[in-house]
């Protein structure tokens, strides 16, 4: 099958790599597709956080080598019978324009798979430009990929939600997904709007859980209760389970945050509800929690202090710093006249790109180098390599043994026994 | 004081004499007659910096202005203006200059005072203020928990309150996005009634107090500041030194006093004893204004005022807005016998303009002893009051139209408003503008504004009440700065004509002293010695009620 993939999002690249691996002829029109021909070249993701996705680059390369994956100009791409849209949430206008051009190209029947997070009603808007009677259909396939395991999530999904209002289109989509649908335990068909709403609802629910457990952790802090114990207790209730219940210094990530912002706006506009706005506002406060603990430890004065930060990416396994708690922490520390020494296994170049050479910032390639002479170490991303450090070495290198554990990865008792002042999130 | 004046070589006395004769001739002429004269608007309206000063509804003819300018010349106004700007000690009773104009000088200007250039110091403090504004707007000013400050309470009274309150309200539309998360409150009253209500609602961890006091001895302000400090201590349990460092900024001309109170150097913003309190919103006293509208807009406000300064300093008297506004006031007060002055802004954003001008005019010129120590033979500052015009229409306009008191009025109204907003809001402004013009017209013309005769004696309007219309192209930081500077200079011009010092306020000192003594007496029974009998009676009654006796 000849498929054109549009967009520069993670989903676009994953779909292109996976579909071409299974015999489809995939035409890429990623990046700046409008008006610029990239025909003949092998193009790759423009975001570094996407190219860092495990296995993705290899699979793309294989696709190009096999000849089944090709970058083509917009005109050629428009003539394909299947179009896969995985565009950024703020590109709805471009998507509408694109679908109008697909309509003009006149291929019938034709399938448009919308995997972009444009919000509720967007797929219907796209359909409006097409001739459904003549077999031009839009289906909505919500993007459920997770950074760090995106290829697996696509190739072995547990469940598939499909927003589709046309039987022929459904059959067409399922035939495309056949190589990947073996593991599907649940396939649910719904309208396009319902599919978009479901995507919204799931994301919002996750944010609410995180917001709730963080709120509880902060309360536990004030009441002298260990949130870790409470959390394990909560997880024994099967109605609740243990997912998305780890308190920490806030959630980040471009898509997650953008998406919740979209939903919060919708709730606020249509319902005057501040439920998710509160979650977002509290999450921003939560990102500064490690800073606040440090601020109080040093009697509200951090001028001239040296602070090491371990972990800058918004979560382990990615190089992305989009809406990462580390950014707010760095900015707060800089504003107070502190010196920061930064380490991250993957995201350091991203941070360096953002702040450049800065008199108050040191970029360290080595985690132990970062804590040299530091008055405190803040752990903000729970990369595996940070879980069991050589505490003795840490204590020797640091000017003052102070640890603020923004992800609750250390055992407070043990760390304190080793002579550190320890602050967790809701830990005793 | 019979100095020789201008080219006519007339003394001020003879200028007054000429004016008096002119006034007698003009008095019988009703405004409805004057308003019918051709070319009147062109001859009696003046423009500068987005402001139109329309004097055509005053009981004057073009010749009146000529005569008034002769009096200004005879009073050596040009020399006084020069002295004001040059930093001569025009505040002679306190032996210092009054250099509010220096606060608005651009960075590349220079002004020597006792061999020192003031401008670098002025701009250094503005720069320090800008740093604080940036830190607060970036939400990087942290309270004792490390949370960003999101609420600012300005504690100050008089000049440390009225100017910032007025400007924050007037220019709220110009609030930059960064300032939108910051709530600003004002607390002035010494009895703590504003503060008590506020503290119930505020979060101590995220509240910053600005303590604004030129002398840092103002009892009203320090009493409020002490209550705020205690509130923070009780809420936080944190060391006082840390709390004051993170939650208090002092704006003062007395750095030592502020330091004694506990505010460290780094948290102080300064101005100088050559800035009068009621002329101080251009200095770091304007910190809350800068927080509200951002530093760029604050500088625009200064630029608007500076433009008016330059106009006042250089324009010929007969084209000089401040001089014209002042001299027409002198005409009304001293020659036509008006002793009440209503300030009527037709724009809710200027709601605090009347209160501001009450202080500016009455504290400056509410005096009867002249610079040379002699008693003034002429009346000086009238009673000023006012209200947002459309609201005042439902309150005291009855008196303006049909009362027995003669009142002169200033109408202040912007032409353009709500241009980026809804059509219905634009229509609302249109409504206000229409009311403003209609009221000025009816005050002047009376019944003549109608086609028909009034139906009953109670429906008669005699008219002939003079008013000035100040038309602003739009209300912006720039035109607002120019407007306030215009009134400042107007006050100065009138003070020159009356021979008084507008920059002192000895009249408010005695009451303060008496209150200190009274506080001691209230605290201790049987110490009423030296009190007058009615006061002794009141003290006894207060003590009886306090002790719970029925």
Image (cartoon, coloured by chain):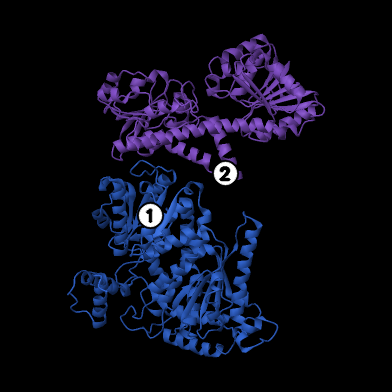
The chain in blue: B
Determine which residue is flagged by label 2. A268
From the viewer's perspective, is residue B159 above or below residue A402? below
Q: Which residue occupies the extreme right position in the image?
A: A134
Tell me if mark 2 has few (under 14), some (14-19) or many (20+) residues whose alpha carbon lies within 10 angstroms of its own: some
Residue at the image position 52 percent from the left and 88 percent from the top: B22
In this picture, residue B112 sits left or right of residue A96? left
Please indicate, yes or no, whether residue B284 appears anywhere in the rendered image: no
Q: Is residue B157 above or below residue A173?
A: below
Both marks 2 and 1 on one chain = no
Position of B100 relative to B531 (above/below): above
Circles 2 and 1 in contact, beta carbons < 8 Å? no
Please identify the quadrant where the N terminus of chain B is shown: bottom left
Q: Quadrant of the C terminus of chain B?
A: bottom left
List the residue tagged with mark 1. B200
Chain for numbered disc 2: A
User: In which quadrant of the rendered view does residue B79 lie?
Assistant: bottom left
Q: Quick one: SS at disc 2?
A: helix
Rendered location of residue B61, percent (x, y): 57, 82
Disc 1 is attached to a residue of which chain? B
């Amino acid at each position: 099958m000849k498929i054109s993939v549009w967009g520069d999002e993670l989903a676009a690249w994953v779909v292109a790599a996976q579909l071409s691996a299974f015999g489809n002829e995939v035409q890429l029109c990623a990046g700046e597709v409008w008006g610029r021909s990239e025909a003949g070249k092998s193009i790759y993701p423009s975001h570094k956080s996407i190219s860092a996705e495990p296995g993705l680059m290899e699979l793309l390369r294989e696709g190009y080598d096999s000849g089944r994956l090709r970058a083509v100009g917009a005109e050629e791409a428009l003539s394909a019978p299947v179009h896969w849209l995985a565009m950024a949430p703020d590109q709805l206008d471009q998507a509408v324009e694109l679908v109008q051009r697909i309509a003009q190209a006149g291929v019938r029947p034709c399938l448009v798979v919308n995997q972009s997070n444009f919000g509720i009603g967007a797929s219907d808007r796209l359909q409006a430009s097409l001739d459904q009677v003549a077999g031009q259909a839009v289906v909505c396939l919500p993007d459920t990929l997770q950074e760090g395991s995106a290829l697996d999530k696509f190739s072995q999904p547990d469940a598939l939600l499909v927003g589709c209002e046309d039987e022929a289109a459904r059959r067409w989509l399922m035939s495309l997904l056949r190589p990947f649908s073996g593991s599907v335990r649940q396939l649910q068909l719904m309208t396009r709007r319902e599919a978009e709403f479901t995507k919204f609802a799931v994301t919002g629910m996750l944010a609410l859980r995180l917001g709730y457990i963080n709120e509880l952790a902060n309360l536990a802090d004030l009441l002298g209760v260990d949130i870790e114990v409470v959390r394990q207790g909560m997880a024994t209730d099967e109605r609740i389970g243990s997912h998305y219940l780890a308190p920490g210094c806030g959630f980040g990530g471009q898509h997650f945050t953008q998406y919740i912002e979209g939903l919060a706006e919708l709730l606020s506009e249509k319902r005057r509800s501040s439920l998710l706005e509160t979650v977002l506002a509290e999450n921003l406060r939560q990102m500064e929690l490690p800073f606040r603990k440090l601020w109080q430890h040093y009697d509200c004065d951090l001028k001239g202090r040296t602070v090491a930060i371990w972990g800058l990416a918004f979560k382990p396994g990615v190089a992305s710093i989009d809406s990462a708690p580390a950014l707010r922490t760095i900015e707060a520390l800089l504003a107070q006249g502190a010196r920061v020494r930064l380490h991250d296994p993957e995201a350091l170049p991203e941070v360096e790109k953002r702040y450049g050479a800065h008199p108050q910032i040191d970029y360290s390639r080595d985690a132990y180098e970062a804590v040299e002479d530091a008055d405190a170490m803040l752990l903000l991303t729970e990369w595996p390599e940070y879980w069991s450090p050589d505490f003795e070495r840490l204590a020797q290198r640091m000017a003052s043994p102070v640890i603020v554990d923004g992800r609750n990865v250390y055992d407070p008792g043990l760390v304190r026994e080793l002579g550190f002042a320890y602050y967790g999130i809701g830990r005793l | 004081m019979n100095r020789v004046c201008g080219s006519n070589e007339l003394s001020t006395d003879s200028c007054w004499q000429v004016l008096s004769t002119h006034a007698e001739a003009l008095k019988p002429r009703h405004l409805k007659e004057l308003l019918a004269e051709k070319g009147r608007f062109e001859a009696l309206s003046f423009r500068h910096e987005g402001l139109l000063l329309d004097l055509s509804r005053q009981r004057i003819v073009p010749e009146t202005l000529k005569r008034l300018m002769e009096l200004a010349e005879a009073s050596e106004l040009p020399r006084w203006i020069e002295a004001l700007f040059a930093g001569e000690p025009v505040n002679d009773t306190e032996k210092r200059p009054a250099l509010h104009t220096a606060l608005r000088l651009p960075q590349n200007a220079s002004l020597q005072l006792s061999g020192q250039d003031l401008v670098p110091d002025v701009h250094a403090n503005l720069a320090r203020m800008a740093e604080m504004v940036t830190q607060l707007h970036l939400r990087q000013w942290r309270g004792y928990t490390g949370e960003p400050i999101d609420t600012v309470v300005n504690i100050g009274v008089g000049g440390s309150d009225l100017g910032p309150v007025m400007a924050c309200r007037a220019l709220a539309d110009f609030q930059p996005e960064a300032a939108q998360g910051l709530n600003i409150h004002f607390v002035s009253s010494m009895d703590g009634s504003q503060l008590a209500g506020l503290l119930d609602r505020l979060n101590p961890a995220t509240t910053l107090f600005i303590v604004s006091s030129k002398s840092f001895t103002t009892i009203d302000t320090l009493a409020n500041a002490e209550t705020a400090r205690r509130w923070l201590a009780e809420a936080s349990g944190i060391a006082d030194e840390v709390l004051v460092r993170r939650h208090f900024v002092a704006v003062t001309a007395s750095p030592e006093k502020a330091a004694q109170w506990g505010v460290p150097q780094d948290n102080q913003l300064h101005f100088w004893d050559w800035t009068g309190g009621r002329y101080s919103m251009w200095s770091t006293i304007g910190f809350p204004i800068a927080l509200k509208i951002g530093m760029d807009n604050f500088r625009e406000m200064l630029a608007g005022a500076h433009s008016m300064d330059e106009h006042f300093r250089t324009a010929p008297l007969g084209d000089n807005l401040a001089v014209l506004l002042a001299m027409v006031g002198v005409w009304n007060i001293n020659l036509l016998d008006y002793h009440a002055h209503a300030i009527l802004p037709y724009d809710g954003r200027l709601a605090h303009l009347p209160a501001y001008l009450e202080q500016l005019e009455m504290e400056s010129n509410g005096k009867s002893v002249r610079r040379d120590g002699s008693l003034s033979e002429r009346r000086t500052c009238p009673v000023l009051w006012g209200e947002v015009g459309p609201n005042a229409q439902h309150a005291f306009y009855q008196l303006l139209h049909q009362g027995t008191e003669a009142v002169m009025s200033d109408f202040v109204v912007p032409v353009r408003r709500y241009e980026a907003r809804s059509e219905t809001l634009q229509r609302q402004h249109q409504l206000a503008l229409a009311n403003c013009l209609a009221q000025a017209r009816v005050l002047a013309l009376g019944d003549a504004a109608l086609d028909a005769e009034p139906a009953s004696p109670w429906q008669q309007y005699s008219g002939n009440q003079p008013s000035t219309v100040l038309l602003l192209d739009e209300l912006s930081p720039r035109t607002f700065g120019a407007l306030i500077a215009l009134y400042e200079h107007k006050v100065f011009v009138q003070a020159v004509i009356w021979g008084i010092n507008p920059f002192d306020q000895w009249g408010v000192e005695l009451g303060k002293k008496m209150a200190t003594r009274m506080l001691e007496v209230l605290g201790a029974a049987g110490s009423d010695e030296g009190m007058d009998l009615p006061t002794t009676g009141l003290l006894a009654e207060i003590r009886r009620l306090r002790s719970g006796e029925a």
